């Protein structure tokens, strides 16, 4: 997914295994059926934070556009389809 690749998300996340951060599949499973997840995770990617999966923080991404954050979070919640 282009937004994930060009914003270094894949330096800390993989689709199906834990790296520095949780796998995108695990994130999709955790928030399955949670109608508030899209907005909540968009904010988390933009502002960063820790404590949901462990003590390691995710850095903020203040330079990303709202549209890019929206599309990458939607992709993660959709189960990270390969196309
Ligand atoms: C420097 C490493 C790092 C980078 C870069 C990074 N993440 Fe993360 N990410 C983490 C860590 C660590 C967590 C777990 C945070 C926590 O426990 O609250 C996380 C958590 C998440 C979560 C789940 C948040 C939650 O509250 O459940 C999402 C969604 C996510 N990352 C998406 C992204 C996206 C999209 C990008 C690229 C724009 C990205 N991450 C870049 C390390 C990173």
Image (tube, rainbow, N blue to C red):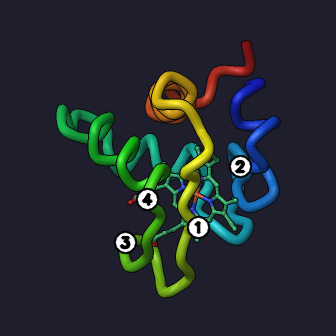
- Whole-percent x and y of residue 76? 53, 35
Give the distance between the C-alpha atoms of the residues marked 3 and 4, in whole angstroms.
14 Å
> Which class describes the residues within 10 Å of circle 1: few (<14), some (14-19), or many (20+)?
few
Q: Disc 3 vs disc 4: which is toward the camera? A: 4
- Whole-percent x and y of residue 39? 28, 37
Residue drawn at point x = 73 percent, y = 20 percent: 82
Residue annotated with mark 4: 47
Residue drawn at point x = 73 percent, y = 66 percent: 19
The quarter in which the N terminus is drawn is top right
Secondary structure state at the residue bearing disc 1: loop
Q: Are marks 1 and 3 in contact (CB under 8 Å)?
A: no
**Which quarter of the frame holds ligand 1?**
bottom right
Give the distance between the C-alpha atoms of the residues marked 1 and 2, in whole angstroms.
10 Å
Secondary structure state at the residue bearing disc 3: loop
Which residue is at the far bottom? Answer: 55
Residue annotated with mark 3: 52
Residue annotated with mark 2: 9
Judging depth in this view, the residue of 12 and 25 nearest the camera is: 12
Judging depth in this view, the residue of 67 and 38 nearest the camera is: 67
Give the distance between the C-alpha atoms of the residues marked 1 and 3, in whole angstroms.
14 Å
Instruction: State whether label 1 is within 8 Å of ligand 1.
Output: yes
Task: Note whether 22 is above or below 43 in the view shown.
Answer: below
Instruction: State whether label 2 is within 8 Å of ligand 1.
Output: yes
Q: Judge from the rendering whether residue 50 lies leftward or rightward of residue 34; answer left or right.
A: right
Q: Judge from the rendering whether residue 41 lies leftward or rightward of residue 4; answer left or right.
A: left
Which residue is at the far left? Answer: 35
Residue annotated with mark 1: 59
Q: Are marks 1 and 4 in contact (CB under 8 Å)?
A: no
């Amino acid at each position: 997914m282009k937004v994930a690749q060009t914003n270094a998300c894949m330096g800390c996340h993989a689709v199906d295994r834990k790296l520095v951060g949780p796998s995108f599949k695990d994130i999709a499973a955790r928030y399955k059926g949670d109608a508030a997840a899209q907005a909540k995770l968009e904010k988390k990617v933009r502002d960063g934070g820790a404590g949901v999966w462990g003590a390691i923080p995710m850095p903020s991404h203040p330079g990303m556009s709202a549209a890019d954050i929206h599309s990458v979070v939607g992709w993660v919640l959709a189960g990270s389809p390969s196309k």
